[in-house]
């Protein structure tokens, strides 16, 4: 798994193009303030031990959110960080498991619409811990 975490003063997304037929039709636009956005790429190898992958994902997201003094986390599927892609259904399961565990840890969690290209608008501050990349 690879994850690019960016803290944003504001983050806006809008659905544009549906890319996966097996997922529901969604027309959505949302603006979120003071949140950590996890641009997450789930790889094939992550299926070997899904529980371990989710635990590492949670650990990194919580750490970065705490470093940026926020309780808001956005999970965004970003299949552009590797050439190895997990099955979309498995990726969505990982996101759902991560969301549930983060909610249970008192974070406010949202997922961007899965299976869509989105228009994104991101306002990120310029300090080192506002942008963190992890691979595990």
Image (cartoon, grey):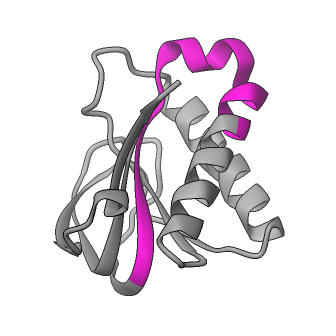
Where residue 133 appears, x then y in whole percent? 36, 40
Where residue 4 appears, x then y in whole percent? 35, 45
The front one of 47 and 59 is 59
How many numbered discs? 0
**For this view, does 56 lie left or right of residue 11?**
right
Decide: is 61 above or below 127. Answer: above
Give the quadrant of residue 8. Answer: bottom left
53 within the magenta span = yes
80 within the magenta span = no
Decide: is 19 above or below 38. Answer: above
Residue in view at x 56 percent, y 43 percent? 92
The front one of 88 and 51 is 51
Residue in view at x 26 percent, y 79 percent? 12
Give the quadrant of residue 28. Answer: bottom left
Residue in view at x 48 percent, y 22 percent? 86
Residue in view at x 63 percent, y 58 percent? 62
Give the quadrant of residue 52. Answer: top right
**For this view, does 49 lie left or right of residue 42?**
right
Report the span colored magenta: 34-55
Where residue 41 appears, x then y in whole percent? 41, 34
Residue placed furthest toward the right: 104
Decide: is 133 above or below 87. Answer: below
């Amino acid at each position: 798994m690879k994850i690019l975490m960016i803290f944003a003063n504001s983050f806006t997304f809008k659905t544009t193009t549906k890319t996966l037929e097996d997922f529901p039709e969604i027309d959505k636009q949302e603006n979120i303030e003071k949140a950590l956005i996890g641009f997450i790429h789930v790889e094939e190898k992550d299926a070997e031990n899904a529980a371990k992958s989710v635990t590492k994902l949670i650990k990194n997201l919580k750490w970065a959110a705490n470093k940026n003094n926020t309780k808001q986390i956005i999970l965004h599927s970003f299949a552009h960080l590797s050439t190895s892609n997990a099955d979309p259904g498995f990726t969505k399961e990982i996101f759902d498991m991560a969301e549930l565990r983060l909610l249970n840890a008192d974070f406010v969690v949202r997922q961007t619409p899965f299976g869509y290209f989105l228009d994104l608008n991101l306002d990120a501050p310029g300090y080192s811990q506002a942008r963190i990349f992890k691979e595990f």
